[in-house]
Image (cartoon, rainbow, N blue to C red):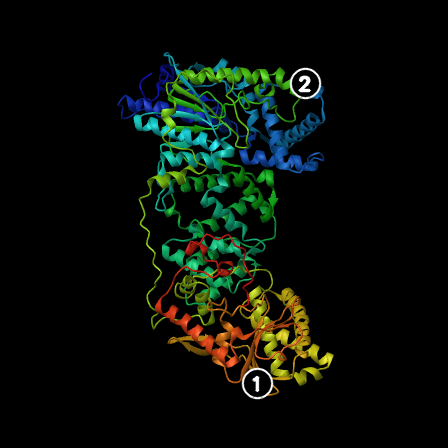
Amino acid sequence: MSASGERVSPGLLAAAAGGSTILAPNSELAAAVFAAIERAHRDKGEAVWPTPKVFDFATWLREQYAYRQLANADSPRCLTEVEERELWRSVIEAEERGRDFLDPAAAARAARRSRRAIQEYGIPLQAIGRELSEESEAFLKWNQAFDERCRALECISADALLASADAPQSPLAWIESPAWRPVARQWLARNALLLKPEEIPAAQAAARLGSASPAAELSALAAWAKFNLQADERFRAWVCIPDLNQRRAEVVDAMDAALARQRFSLRYAAGAAPYAVAGGTSLAAFAPVRVALETLTVSMGAVSFPRFSVLLRTPEMQATHSDASAAAALDVALRSHAPSEADIDTWLGLAERVARSENMGPVAAVQRLRAARRALADSRNAERISVWVSAWIAALEAGPWAERSRWSSSEYQAAQRFRELLAELATAESLFGNISRESALRVLKRAAHDTAFQPQTGVPAIWVSGQLIDPWVNYDGIWVTRCSDEYWPPRVEPIALLPVRLQRQYGVISAAAETQLNLAHDLQRRWRARAMQCVFSFADPGDGRSSAPSPLLPPNTLPQPERYWAQLAAAPQPHWRALLDAAPPLESLSDESAPPFSGDERTRGVSTLRAQSRCAFRGFAETRLAAKTLEQPVPGFNERERGELVHHALEHAWSVLRNSNELQLLAPGAQLQLLDEAAVGAIAWISKRRDPGPRWQARERARLRHLLALWLDVERKRAPFAVEYLEQGAQVAQFAGLDFKVRVDRVDRLADGARVLIDYKTGAANADWRGDRPDNPQLPIYALLRPEALVAVAYARVNAGDSGFTAEAERRDIFKLGSRTSALEGMPNFAALIGLWSRRVERLAAAFASGHAEVAPTLNACQTCKLHGLCRVPAALEPADDANE
């Protein structure tokens, strides 16, 4: 073997040059053989050569059968993969035994695999019948039903193609591999030329590597690949990770950390990497397919706001950065108007109205969703599946696929495979018959989910496989993971539903420990014959247990193997370690000052000073950066809206009553009517902005009447008073030269002419206005706005569990039951306290106006803040009830 690269069997090159069709047992080996032939021509300096005819056996059988159908149009049609899966599913669900399964799809997969096994290994059905068990009896019934359905549909399944295959009319060759099943091997031995791989004649180096964790094992593997690629850019390796399906994301992370760090850059554009991971992932996981399925799904039934929000902002709906910004702005505006869920037509209508009211103009994402919706004609009738497929394609072309020019190569390939899947479904009318749109969409979603897809990127330097196979082509290095005594040789795993004795009799390798052991020995021999350097690794499971190497592994003959991977320390998230290593040194700069407040800026009223008092950075961020928590539409009225309902309802009630005397004289029937009018009016007012629907309105009406009745009982126990002022619009208070709009809920006048200022709270209401940096300077600010004869300020706690007053009062007789008073912060009277509050508020306003923005929260400030990601304060804190501030 040469120092680097691959060595290709001369017989393989001769067969390809002679025009033979070369067959491999699976698509992964077919791709490797194809790439090896192409590379051999390039290495010879050739510019042009015939395209090699390399196929996996299953694909070749389908192609040959299709040619025979052209000559005989009456021959039964071969089921597609999707049709076969759906037919098995329908058989399982129709049978009485199948209905007992919690997961019919899993039962269908097991039955399909069992049927394929009896064809591949030549297991007679009569032999299964003679060893009847509950499982095999169920399989035989399902298999018979499947055959009957196939005959009725005039179709055959792919596993029956070999039995009807004719002798090949053109030269045929097959690569020698333990992956071939006995029936296929026998047919190929009669009809094709056997090609054997080129074995390395020299002594091969081998190494065992134990790691402290699975993450460390992957890190070492990636470092080994990196070391060898840096030493020789022509280095080629085959990597086997048997549990790849469960660890794909971890494998990609580890390989990217060593071989493609650029993938973690925010500006990374998809491109080639020196490795590829075989096997593919669910087609439904690729962006164009995911958004296509979601677009079709939301066209039926109720759609939650989070779901509509994600679809509105998805990149596939945006042609430009401006489109994306408009969609994001519309999403923010919708949150204060949106119900928790609605059908797609309601969502689109609401989005268009809000966009107009906010002067946004047409939003491209909404227009594309509207176009897709128009293409999906509403029909409750059952139609042929081809009708639904035509409507789906039209909707996708008008909506999420309208901007496909922006797709990457892998996205384009995924969308193309999805188109092929749609075409397969369109030809399956005989199987599905007339079908509702909901049922047709369920079939499509299952098909996309069950179809594995791998974008074509060529065969790169490092090929990562999940199959325990002979790679056939020679490599510079081979690495096999999971070689501990627990997993190597592989565990015995008989095929479900078939008698184990029969499986062992007919040579099912996974059914017996002896055959698994023989396979392990054979694969180890083949691996060592394919590469000059083989590494067998294993890892401790990470739960405190230790792993030992399998006794089957060869001894260490690779000198100082640690030098290949010691350069990269293992880490649970190795790509973050890679980013840290590559990051430039950072200079720390503490900047606690923003530009002074300018004349064209606006404050947020009390909210600005409340935030400034709690944390100067929060005051700056919320007011001047407009940083705020996004609302999340909920079923019914949210906490903020419930607080507003109470405010509006009490405003109406006291605008009628006006004083405590009228309240004392109020008859039960008149009170019920008054509170009902107050509740209805408040609900109507709130519902103009966001209407949760009649059901929630009715529930809130009853709740609000009950809550207001409880509150009036509290008010009856107070000393006599008259309501002098009710909130009638915002007033402007000026502090440190800045204007702050404020809204006072209510001012009462007592019998002696003294006044009490009240603010309603439906959540927690503690005395949070005290101290040099109060958590909430709201009541002091209100007091400074209306200080005349003021003797008390209070939170009115209007809630069902703890109604009463939290007050700062000069006298103890103002509030009675359920009230808590204070000592005026050490001031001799309320007038002096107002003077203290004035100095305090002026100081807060002056700090805000000057641009003071230090991250210095008060003790409990972080509990009500949602800006931790912006200010970087590490706080794992519980959210506080802040709804009514």
At label 1, the amino acid type is Ala
x and y percentages locating residue 211 in the rendered image: 46, 28
x and y percentages locating residue 354 in the rendered image: 47, 65
Residue bearing mark 1: 754
x and y percentages locating residue 676 in the rendered image: 67, 75
x and y percentages locating residue 204 in the rendered image: 39, 15
| Label 2: which secondary element | helix
Nearest the camera: 545 or 412?
Answer: 545
- Observer able to see residue 78: yes
Q: Is residue 854 above or below residue 780?
A: above
Neighbours of disc 1 within 10 Å: few (<14), some (14-19), many (20+): some
Give the side of residue 447 with respect to residue 360, left or right.
right
Nearest the camera: 383 or 872?
Answer: 872
User: What is the residue that sits farthest to the bottom in this orientation?
Assistant: 752
Q: Is residue 181 above or below residue 880?
A: above
Give the side of residue 101 with respect to residue 346, left or right.
right
Q: Which mark is residue 127?
A: 2
Q: CA distance from mark 1 to mark 2?
A: 102 Å
Give the side of residue 356 with respect to residue 259, left or right.
right
Q: Residue at x 33, y 71 (%)?
A: 598
Neighbours of disc 2 within 10 Å: few (<14), some (14-19), many (20+): few
| Label 1: which secondary element | loop
Q: Earlier in the sequence, mark 1 or mark 2?
A: 2
